[in-house]
Amino acid sequence: MTKTFKVKVNGGPELAVDATEGTLLEALEKHQLEMHYHCRSGFCGACRTKLNSGQVRYTTEPLAYVRKGDILPCCCVPESDLDIEH
Amino acid sequence: MSYSTFNQEQTNPLTEPMFLGNSVNVARYDQQKHSIFEKLIEKQISFFWRPEEIDVSRDRVDFNKLTDSEKHVFISNLKYQTLLDSIQGRSPNIALLPIVSIPELETWIETWSFFETIHSRSYTHILRNLFTDPSEVFEDIVINEQIKIRANDISQYYDDLIFYTQLWQTHGEGEVTVDGETYNVTQREIKKKLFLCINSVNALEAIRFYVSFACTFAFAERELMEGNAKIIKLIARDENVHLTSTQHILNLWQYGEDDPEMKEIAEELRDEAYEIFMTAVKQEKQWAHYLFKDGSMIGLNESMLCQYVEYIANLRMQAIGFDAPFENMRSNPLPWMNKYLVSDNVQVAPQEAEITSYLVGQIDSEVNASDLGDFDL
Ligand code: FES
Ligand SMILES: [Fe+2]
Ligand SMILES: [Fe+2]
């Protein structure tokens, strides 16, 4: 079953992201966005992204410090439409 | 104030600050004030590796094919990394353990430092393979001007904290005169030294390795010095865990999730913290200049390295609540770096027999009696 949400990055166009198909980071890479990352598993914090609106769910518990209003796209999936700054 | 290896007072570690509260006594982890440190311990230990299991023998052939300027790049980076890990293999223990107040952080510090000693041992492993006698390389580390500048900048914050802690432990608060110099020792003063020290260590873990990492991986992109690259990949993965820990400490302080006095100090010394980071950035760029003084290497030059330092610095500064200082360096100038910094990649390639051998123990322990049912003994 697909669960598709609309994700807006840096004020750009709305991109369709299927929450059942990999992490938010992977989804945005499929849309050809240049993403920041190192570990891709939630401990380094290099993918840190600002969440302007919406909700995400972590599929791996993040070990990097997640400041209020930030998310780590390498280990989460959207739970609603999102507006983010990466 | 003298240190006791087992504080006999009944304390509640759940209400202690990370540092400079009551000293630790029972090493228990069933209850934790900041459970993140226990999680980092688990993560770090799950990454355990041994330098000796990584085959670097082919690197010797590659090394002899390098140009003189490439040899300079390779060896200088190893020297610098040796310096960094020599410092990190002892300093968190010496500077931070005497003042730590919660057991999960105490054990994290010990785990962290221990892994730095693995890094140090791996440099000997690499150098022994390249030179019959690597003494000259090691001996240069305490003579080389470029390295000395960096050594001084990093160790001064540790040394300062260690010295004030020693005065406080032996004399308590107040004025203390040592060798004709008077020091005003207060707990707040020590907390300030601690704050600056953690900022300096954070900058070290955040960017100081990345110029040399980039060179190593640039060689690997040309299929040169690949044994070395495997080792550096493992080191880079560890450094990311260390960095996360210093970012946690700084953020817990500044966002008021630990010691309220440290929150005040974080505000008071914010500019100094910023400067510490920017000095490290500047020194790394100078290092890139020193590396390429006799010529670049294929795929990498001084200006690309400096751009990469700025790119990484942006990410790291934002992680501790600063604005990105290099606005026009938002996109990664060395995209191929990322494939070496991905953590899951570390164990995938089937030809990396040395690394997959870590799985042997795991598989063995899964063999149970029924699997052996057909065996007649
Ligand atoms: S890439 Fe490391 S935390 Fe997301
Ligand atoms: Fe290290
Ligand atoms: Fe480290």
Image (tube, coloured by chain):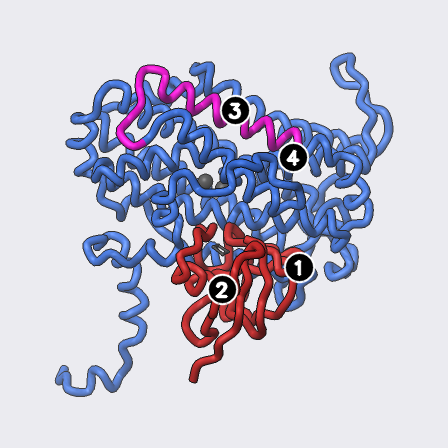
Residue at image point 57% right, 52% down = B108
Q: Residue B202 location in percent, x, y?
A: 58, 39
Name the kind of residue labelled 3 in the image: Gln
Which residue of the protein is positioned furthest toward the right in this rendering? B174
Which chain is indicated by disc 3? B
Which residue of the protein is positioned furthest toward the front in this rendering? A13
State the residue position of label 4.
Answer: B197
Per the image, label 4 sits on a secondary structure element best described as: helix
State the residue position of label 1.
Answer: A69
Task: Look at chain A in the picture and name its colour.
Answer: red
Which chain is indicated by disc 4? B
Quarter assignment of residue B221: top left
Q: CA distance from mark 2 to mark 4?
A: 31 Å
Q: Are marks 3 and 2 in contact (CB under 8 Å)?
A: no
In this view, the mark in front (3 or 1): 1
In this view, the mark in front (1 or 4): 1
Which residue of the protein is positioned furthest toward the left in this rendering? B376
Q: Is residue B293 magenta?
A: yes
Are discs 3 and 2 both within one chain? no
Are discs 1 and 4 both within one chain? no
In this view, the mark in front (1 or 2): 1
Residue at image point 63% right, 51% down = B248
Magenta span? B274-299
Name the kind of residue labelled 1 in the image: Gly
Which chain is indicated by disc 2? A
Name the kind of residue labelled 4 in the image: Cys
Q: CA distance from mark 3 to mark 1?
A: 33 Å
State the residue position of label 3.
Answer: B283
Ligand 1 lies under 8 Å from the Cβ of mark 2: yes
Name the kind of residue labelled 2 in the image: Cys
Per the image, label 3 sits on a secondary structure element best described as: helix
Q: Nearer the viewer, residue B136 or B344?
A: B344
